[in-house]
């Protein structure tokens, strides 16, 4: 958005200083609510990470572990009368296509019965 008339640089700096405190308070409140109380705020100093700590996505289950989770969710959804693909999506956090691939992989691994009876 653009301000009309445009804000001078001094006024913009004053605005940023004025809203910084409430934004940090809101961030801390959300971090406390979601269990990330140690999450660093912008002006709280450098974050101290333990040596070898990784950034980015948390480690995901791979291979047979995720196939087992997908198979359990699939069977549970069938027993509960739910959509099994949506259940696998919720259990793994993947989208529809990836969940369908996981279900197919679980079938190939023998964790689920095959879709079609072979003659």
Image (cartoon, rainbow, N blue to C red):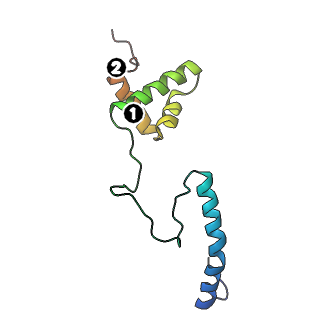
Q: Can residue 2 be seen in this view?
A: no
Q: How crowded is mark 2: few (under 14 residues within 10 Å), some or many (20 or more)?
A: few
Above-or-below relation of 118 to 103: above
Relative to the observer, which residue lies in front, 114 or 77? 77
Q: Is residue 55 left or right of residue 27?
A: left
Above-or-below relation of 119 to 97: above
N-terminal of the pair, mark 1 or mark 2, is 1
Q: Residue 61: x, y in percent? A: 38, 38
| Residue assigned mark 2 | 110
Image quarter in which the C terminus is found: top left
**From this viewpoint, which residue is outermost toward the top?**
119
Q: Is residue 68 visible?
A: yes
Q: How crowded is mark 1: few (under 14 residues within 10 Å), some or many (20 or more)?
A: some
| Residue assigned mark 1 | 66
Above-or-below relation of 13 to 87: below
Find residue 10 and name its label.
Answer: none
- C-alpha distance separating marks 1 and 2: 14 Å
Q: What element carries label 2?
A: loop
Q: Residue 99: x, y in percent? A: 43, 35
Q: Is residue 74 left or right of residue 110?
A: right
Q: In which quarter of the image is residue 48?
A: bottom left
Q: Residue 76: x, y in percent? A: 52, 22
Looking at the image, which residue is at 34% across and 30% down?
Answer: 64
Q: Quadrant of residue 18?
A: bottom right
Mark 1 vs mark 2: give the one in front. Answer: 1
């Amino acid at each position: 958005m653009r301000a009309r008339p445009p804000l001078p640089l001094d006024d913009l700096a004053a605005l940023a200083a004025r809203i910084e405190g409430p934004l940090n308070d809101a961030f801390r409140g959300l971090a406390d609510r979601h269990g990330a109380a140690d999450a660093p705020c912008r002006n709280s100093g450098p974050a101290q990470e333990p040596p070898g700590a990784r950034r980015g996505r948390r480690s995901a289950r791979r291979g047979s572990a995720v196939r087992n989770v997908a198979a359990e969710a699939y069977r549970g959804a069938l027993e509960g009368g739910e959509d099994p693909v949506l259940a696998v999506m919720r259990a793994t956090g993947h989208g529809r296509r990836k969940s369908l691939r996981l279900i197919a992989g679980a079938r190939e691994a023998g964790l689920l019965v095959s879709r079609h009876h072979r003659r």
